[in-house]
Image (spheres, rainbow, N blue to C red):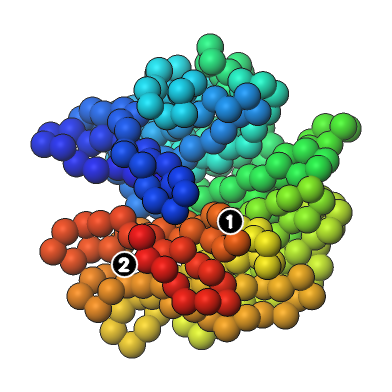
Amino acid sequence: MSWLEPDGEEDVLKVAQFVDGRWLVPREVARGSRLVVNRSDVPELAVAADGTLFAHWLEKLGGDGHAYGARIAKSTDSGSSWVPIGWLHDDLSPVEHGFVSFVPAESGAIEAYWLDGRAHPTGGATAFRTAAVHSEGSPPSAVLDDRVCECCSTDAALTADGPLVVYRDRSADEIRDIGVVRRSADGWSPPQSIHDDGWQINGCPVNGPAVAASGRSVAVAWFTAAAADARVLIALSDDAGASFAEPLVVDEDGPRGQVDVTLAQQGVVITWLRRAETTTEVVWRLVRADGTLGPVGIAGPREDARISGYPRIEAVDDGALLVWVETAEEVRVRGAVLRLNEAVSER
C-alpha cells in the first residue's frame, strides 16, 4: 500500500507491505515540495514479473494546479530502498498527466496507462495513453483513445489474453460511460463500452471504474447517475473481457461511487462509498460466482471520524483487505480484513 503524508514544508510518499496479518515498517519512496496531493489522483504501485516494484507519484509541471506529471521509481529489494527512474510520459508541457494504472509486463518491466492533456493548448481533448516502463525509463507513448473524461481514475488488469484497461470515455455529445480496451496477439482493440448507460453530463464526475481479473475471469465495477438514478454496477466476463454479461445493480440506495474491486476465493468483492444519514460510509459486498449478491457490509468510519479519500481493496488469504482514510483529531489510514462470512477484523 502507498500513501502521502506531510513533513514540514514537504510531502512524502511512503509504502508498506501487509505480511502474515500485519503491516511492516513503512519505507520512503520520494519527498519534496513539488509533490501533488490529490484525493482523486493518487500514487500507484505495481510488481513486475521478476519481483521488481514500481511506484509513481505526481509532481508539479507549472503554476497551474492542473499542470502536473507522473514520476516513476523502482525497488529491487521488496521496497526497502527506491531508485528514481524519471518521468513516465514523453511530454512535459504544463498540462495534466495523471490517473495512472499499471499491469506487469515482461521481466523487470510494467505497462502504464494514463490520462494525458498534451493536446489541451491547441484545443484538443484529454487522451488515454500507454507506454512500457523499464528500469531505464519509458519509450514514446501510444494513444488508446483520443477523447476521454478528464479526471476520472483509470484501472487495469492482466487477463489470460493480455492487458485490459478501463476508463470513463467521453463522446462528442458528452455521454460519459465506461470504456474498455484490451490487447491480444492482434494488438489493441478499438475502444468499446462496457454497457450503454447513457450518462450525459457536461463535466467530469470524478468517479472512475475499477477492474480485477484472474485468467479469463474479469469483473468491472463503476458508478453511474444516468437518468438521475445513482447506481453502483458490476459486469462480469468469462472470456477475458471480449464480452460482458448484463450488469448487476450492487447499490441504488444513495451511493457516491468511488469503487474498487477484487477477486477473492469466495467471489468478487466490491467496495464503494455510500451516503448515510449524517456521514459517508465505506461499504462492501460479495458477488458470488452464480451472480447472487451477499449483504452490504459497513467497514467505516468510526463514530468520531469522517471519510477522507477513497477505499481500496485487495484479496488476501481467505478474504480481502480493505483500506481507507479517516479524519478525526488526526488523519489516519485505517484497514479491515474482511472474512466475508465472518466478522470484520480491524488492522
Relative to the observer, which residue lies in front, 115 or 317? Answer: 317
Q: Quick one: quadrant of the C terminus?
A: bottom left
**Residue at the spot x=67%, y=45% of the render?**
157
Among the 4 quarters of the image, the one containing residue 94: top left
Residue placed under numbered mark 2 in the picture = 307
Residue placed under numbered mark 1 in the picture = 317
User: Visible in this render: residue 208?
Assistant: no
Q: Position of residue 208 (x, y in %)?
A: 54, 57
For this view, does 27 lie left or right of residue 160?
left
Q: Position of residue 118 (x, y in %)?
A: 50, 30
Indicate whether 314 appears above or below 106: below
Amino acid type indicated by mark 2: Ile
Indicate which disc, 2 or 1, sits on the residue closer to the N terminus: 2
Marks 2 and 1, Cα distance to the nearest angstrom?
A: 27 Å
**Residue at the spot x=47%, y=82% of the render?**
254
Relative to the observer, which residue lies in front, 150 or 240? Answer: 240
Q: Position of residue 138 (x, y in %)?
A: 56, 19
Q: Quick one: quadrant of the N terminus?
A: top left
